Image (spheres, grey):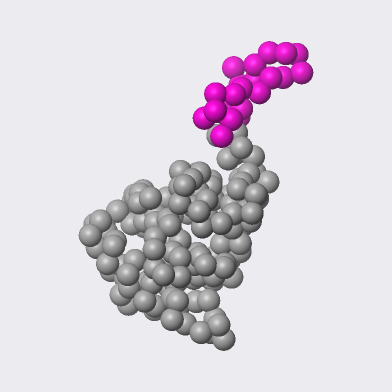
Amino acid sequence: TVSVLYWPWGAMIKAVLILNLQGKIRLVHFYEALIKTGEQQDLVRKVFKAVPRRGDELCNFIDGFTEWPTADTRIVYRRYATLCFIFIVDSSESQLAILDIIQVFVETLDRCFENVCELDLIFHADKVQHVLMEIVMGGMVVETNKEEIFRAVSDMNKLAAGKVATGSGGGAVSVSGYHR
């Protein structure tokens, strides 16, 4: 899944990638609108060349990634089994905070899919994208509470399935948080 959302004053999170260890894309989300689709594919290849070749004894940060078209770029990543979760950020982002966000993302996916695996990312890319959108929007972190993220995703799944929660009085209650 490839998508772009433009934030006029620049994004602190420039892109989010999920790649398997063979370099197959499982999720791509760019927050910089100036990067064209063809260039995005080239950048994914360059990031893949930089990340999986690093040994386990090295840290999960690559500072000064000069292959990216905008200056001041760093890569923060974490491997889980056969998947590599990669956040491309600028230097204003804390590396440890981004690692925490990756952990929240993975734990939320794990809860949504009941022990997430690579096939879940392939066959349910829309749900994975929705979880990411609950955490990061426009290159900015908007939510880090796993319970809130899971609640929002569950509510969206209920709406998509056409189910509406009922209140204690038996009447319909909006599951979106907006009340009539």
Where, by quadrant of the figure, is residue 36 drawn? Answer: bottom left
Which residue is pictured at 59% across the width and 58% down the height? 106
Direction front: furthest residue:
119
Q: Which residues are magenta?
A: 157-180
Quadrant, the C terminus: top right
Q: Is residue 63 left or right of residue 56?
A: left
Camera-side residue: 96 or 79?
79
Whether residue 135 is visible, yes or no, is: yes
Which residue is pictured at 65% across the width and 16% down the height? 172
Answer above or below: position of 100 versus 74.
above
Whether residue 133 is visible, yes or no, is: no
Q: Is residue 23 left or right of residue 93?
A: left
Where, by quadrant of the figure, is residue 116 drawn? Answer: bottom right
Q: Is residue 117 left or right of residue 169?
A: left
Residue 135: x percent and y percent?
54, 50
Q: Main secondary structure of the magenta part?
A: loop
Residue 28: x percent and y percent?
39, 56
Answer above or below: position of 36 versus 134.
below
Residue 174 among those drawn in magenta: yes
Residue 176: x percent and y percent?
58, 29
Residue 74 among those drawn in magenta: no
Answer above or below: position of 50 versus 86.
below
Direction right: furthest residue:
168
Which residue is pictured at 42% across the width and 55% down the height? 27
